[in-house]
Image (cartoon, grey):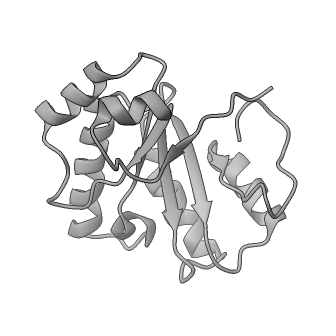
Amino acid sequence: MARLQVGLPELTSDIGKYAAKFDMVELRPEPGRAPRAGTLRSYRKAVNPSFTFSVVLPDVVGRLTPGKDLESALEESLAVAKVIEARCIVLCTPAEVRPTTSTTEKLKRVVARLPRPSVTLCWEPRGIWERPQIVSLARELGVLAVLDATQEMLPPGGAV
């Protein structure tokens, strides 16, 4: 059975106070505005070792458009994930990223650059993707599909 973790999509207060109420948080390092390494290390030291930090990759990465902006945002985000000892990295693709062969190839290139096996890689597609496409492509990519449990049945497994 999967362990349920509860948290917010951003840090809203002092990390110690936050960790007293929740057991995970999503960090969203936007290019040029990511917390410094010292701050990230202090966050990690202030929480229980079982506390989960999840890093959500910036929008520029999710758009999958190759180039300098994607490269620098990805590099900076992966540095944050390493310092904070993130357990999850989430790639959200916006609605304009459609289910095409070209998109699949771009997804493969980005996912291939993400750390394994120490981090759970997650993909959250938005837009016109159908559930069977999402689940199938997530398996092919070796990532977890992020689905809305209030809207549909989740696939079996220890992590969703």
- Please state the horizontal and vertical placement of residue 145, each as a whole percent of the image: 68, 52
Q: Is residue 146 left or right of residue 77?
A: right
Q: Is residue 109 above or below residue 129?
A: above
- Please state the horizontal and vertical placement of residue 153, each as a whole percent of the image: 87, 54
State the quadrant of the C terminus: top right
Asked if residue 97 shows in the view, the reply is: yes
Residue at x 77%, y 65% (from the top left corner): 133
Q: Is residue 38 above or below residue 80?
A: above
Q: Quadrant of residue 113 in the image?
A: top left
Q: Is residue 39 above or below residue 33?
A: above
Residue at x 72%, y 59% (from the top left corner): 148
Quick one: 62 or 36, which is closer to the camera?
A: 36
Q: Is residue 129 left or right of residue 155?
A: left
Q: Is residue 68 above or below residue 142?
A: below
Q: How many marks?
A: 0
Residue at x 22%, y 49% (from the top left corner): 76
Seen as rendered, the residue at the extreme bottom is 96
Q: Is residue 49 left or right of residue 30?
A: right
Quick one: 18 or 80, which is closer to the camera?
A: 18
State the quadrant of the N terminus: top right
Quick one: 25 or 81, which is closer to the camera?
A: 25
- Please state the horizontal and vertical placement of residue 16, each as a whole percent of the image: 31, 29
Residue at x 12%, y 31% (from the top left corner): 38
- Please state the horizontal and vertical placement of residue 49, each as a whole percent of the image: 42, 16
Q: Quadrant of residue 144 in the image?
A: top right
Asked if residue 87 shows in the view, the reply is: no
